[in-house]
Amino acid sequence: MTKGALLAQRPERSSCRAATSSRARALGAAAALSVVTAAGSAAAEASSLPPQLAYAYGENETPRAAAFGGALRALGNGTSAVFMNPSAMVETRVYHLQGLFQGSPEAGRHAYGGVVVDSVTGKLAGAISFVGGFVDNDGVDRTFLDARVGLAYPITERLFVGLTGRYAKITQDGTPGVGGLADSDGYDPVSGGLVETEDGKVAGRHSYVNEFTFDAAITIKPTDNLYIAAVGQNLSYPDNGLLPTTVGGGVGFGTDDLSIEVDGLVDLNSYSDATYRLMAGGEYLVADHFPLRAGYRFDQGADQHALSLGVAYVGTQFSVEASARRALAGGGPTTFVVGLAYHLESSGLTRASSDGL
């Protein structure tokens, strides 16, 4: 994998480390504030996107994953692993904390969250993530919370396994703008879920998704540069389009300066019939600190092609990443993802395991 994909450097000890860390944290806080402020301008009318696209199939992405067009099941180490392939956590040794913003103007979708991943302090790697957000406030008016805990273990130097537990809670107070139903109180139990009353008056709705599910994955490393992954997501089979069960995988190849990957998956629940998505992406490391990324995605269910681009700065102690994806046909969404990460292993505060991979 490219060094930019690792998002980590060997920890260094320096007398100026504390000052550098403070500057990095201040820069991250200022950037995060600007992102939140920019996201305040929500769509003024209901989204015309199909609900599957507005909700992005219930997927959460890091900037690197979005820039690859979603093709990151084999090389998705670090913070991307808890969303894409938990077994990939042990591909590299990192201890990262990352804040995330995801936005789509056409969907009225904006989400905020964070990820912590640790594959340094022990042979068993772990990650935890929380992402919450809003979709189409002037239409379906959906809110969601997504919490995940992932574990990964290297069976051998070339065989990794991983498991992620996921809790999802989704509430919808509105109804679809096209073909939606509404009762006399403006709340339709068919379109939006069970009405919640308080003192005999409509106060909102109960969450209509509130459950646990899990992902499982395996990664094989035939050579030092080749990775092959198989991943199943939402394997408890919730049997709905908000937590669709998907099965798929990817093949990735990476060197110090170049990474490329091709992925495919089958979505069993987002549409009336099973559909597939094909993805491909890559990155090239410039000047040892700037990964340049691009990707492509074909979505059979939506019958759409999309292109994505991304750029990042990766330093010893922190990284700043951004990506954008745009559907090529009319009526498709534009997606922006921004991430700010601090590399805790660079501080020298973590103790690396004596056991190598």
Image (cartoon, rainbow, N blue to C red):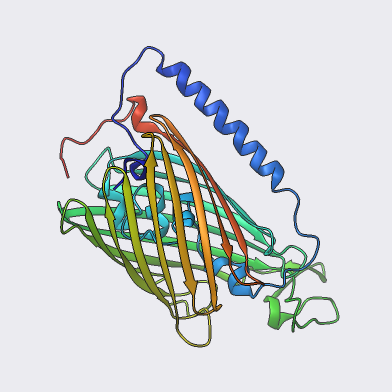
Residue 69 shows in the view: no
Residue in front for this viewpoint, 4 or 231: 4
Q: Position of residue 277 (x, y in %)?
A: 44, 73
Q: Where is residue 243 in the image (x, y as percent from the top left)?
A: 50, 71
Residue at the top extreme of this rendering: 15
* Relative image position of residue 255 (x, y in whole percent): 26, 47
Residue 263 visible in the picture: yes
Is 300 situated above or below 291?
Answer: below
> Residue at coordinates 56% horizontally, 66% vertically from top-left?
56
Q: How many labels does the image show?
A: 0
Relative image position of residue 353 (x, y in whole percent) = 21, 36
Above or below residue 155? Residue 116 is above
Q: Residue at x 74, y 75 (%)?
A: 175
Looking at this view, is 111 or 149 the one in front? 111
Q: In which quarter of the image is residue 228?
A: bottom left
Residue at horizontal 21 percent and vertical 52 percent from the top: 225
* For residue 216, side relative to residue 181 (left or right): left
Vertical relation: 91 (above or below) 206: above
**328 on left or right of 172:** left
